[in-house]
C-alpha cells in the first residue's frame, strides 16, 4: 500500500469514526436530563459532527474514494454497544463525560495524522476542512475537560440528595 492508499483508507476511517460519534452523541444527548450545560454542548457537537460527516463525504467524493459500508456499520454497532453499556452504571453522567473526552482525544490524534497524510498525498484542497474539523474536536475536548469537575460535583450533590436522580 502506498501513502496515497493509506491516506484514502484513513479518510474512510475518519468517516466511520464520525458516524460512530454521531450515534454516541445522539444516544447520550437523549439520555441527559439533569445537566443542561452538558446536554447543550453535546447537542452543539452533534451538529458539528453531522457537518463533519458531510465534509468528509465531499472529500471522499472529490478524491473518488468509495465509503466503507462495513466500517460505517461496525462503527455504528460499536457506538450502540457503548451506549447500552453506558446506561447501566449509576454514575452514567460522569462516565459518559469521561468517555466523551477520551473519544475526542482519539479523534484529535486521528485528524492530526490525517492532516499530515493529506499534505503528503498533495490533497491541498482538503487541508482547510481537516484543520477545521480538528479545531472543533480540540474545542470539544477542551470543553469536556474544563467542565468535568463541575459535572462531577453536580453528580455528587444530586446523588447525595434524597429523591433526586443523579445518573443522567
Image: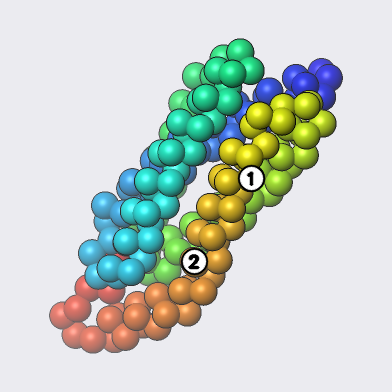
11 lies above or below 108:
above
Quarter of the image for residue 65 reads top right
Q: Residue at x 22, y 73 (%)?
A: 165
Q: Nearer the viewer, residue 74 or 18?
A: 18
Q: Residue at x 55, y 18 (%)?
A: 61
Q: Which residue is mark 1?
A: 131
The answer to whether residue 167 is seen in the rendering is no
Q: Residue at x 37, y 54 (%)?
A: 44
Q: Nearer the viewer, residue 88 or 54?
A: 54
| Disc 2/disc 1 C-alpha distance (Å) | 20 Å
Task: Give SS at disc 2.
Answer: helix
Callout 1: few (<14), some (14-19), or many (20+) C-alpha neighbours within 10 Å? some
150 lies above or below 77:
below
Q: Nearer the viewer, residue 63 or 40?
A: 63
- Circle nearer the N terminus (2, 1): 1
Q: Residue at x 42, y 80 (%)?
A: 150
Task: Give SS at disc 1.
Answer: helix
Q: Which residue is mark 2?
A: 144
Which image quarter is the C terminus in? bottom left
Residue 138 appears at what percent x and percent y?
A: 59, 57
Which image quarter is the N terminus in? top right
89 lies above or below 85:
below
The answer to whether residue 14 is seen in the rendering is yes
Amino acid at each position: 500500500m502506498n501513502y496515497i492508499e493509506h491516506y484514502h483508507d484513513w479518510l474512510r476511517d475518519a468517516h466511520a469514526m464520525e458516524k460512530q460519534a454521531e450515534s454516541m452523541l445522539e444516544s447520550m444527548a437523549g439520555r441527559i436530563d439533569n445537566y443542561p450545560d452538558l446536554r447543550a454542548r453535546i447537542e452543539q457537537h452533534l451538529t458539528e459532527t453531522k457537518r463533519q460527516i458531510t465534509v468528509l463525504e465531499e472529500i471522499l467524493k472529490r478524491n473518488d474514494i468509495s465509503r466503507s459500508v462495513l466500517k460505517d456499520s461496525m462503527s455504528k454497532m460499536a457506538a450502540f454497544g457503548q451506549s447500552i453499556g453506558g446506561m447501566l452504571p449509576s454514575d452514567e453522567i460522569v462516565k459518559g463525560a469521561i468517555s466523551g473526552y477520551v473519544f475526542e482525544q482519539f479523534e484529535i490524534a486521528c485528524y492530526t495524522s490525517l492532516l499530515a497524510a493529506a499534505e503528503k498525498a498533495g490533497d491541498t484542497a482538503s487541508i482547510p476542512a481537516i484543520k477545521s474539523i480538528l479545531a472543533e474536536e480540540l474545542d470539544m475536548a477542551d470543553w469536556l475537560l474544563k467542565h468535568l469537575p463541575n459535572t462531577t460535583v453536580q453528580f455528587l450533590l444530586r446523588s447525595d440528595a434524597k429523591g433526586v436522580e443523579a445518573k443522567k
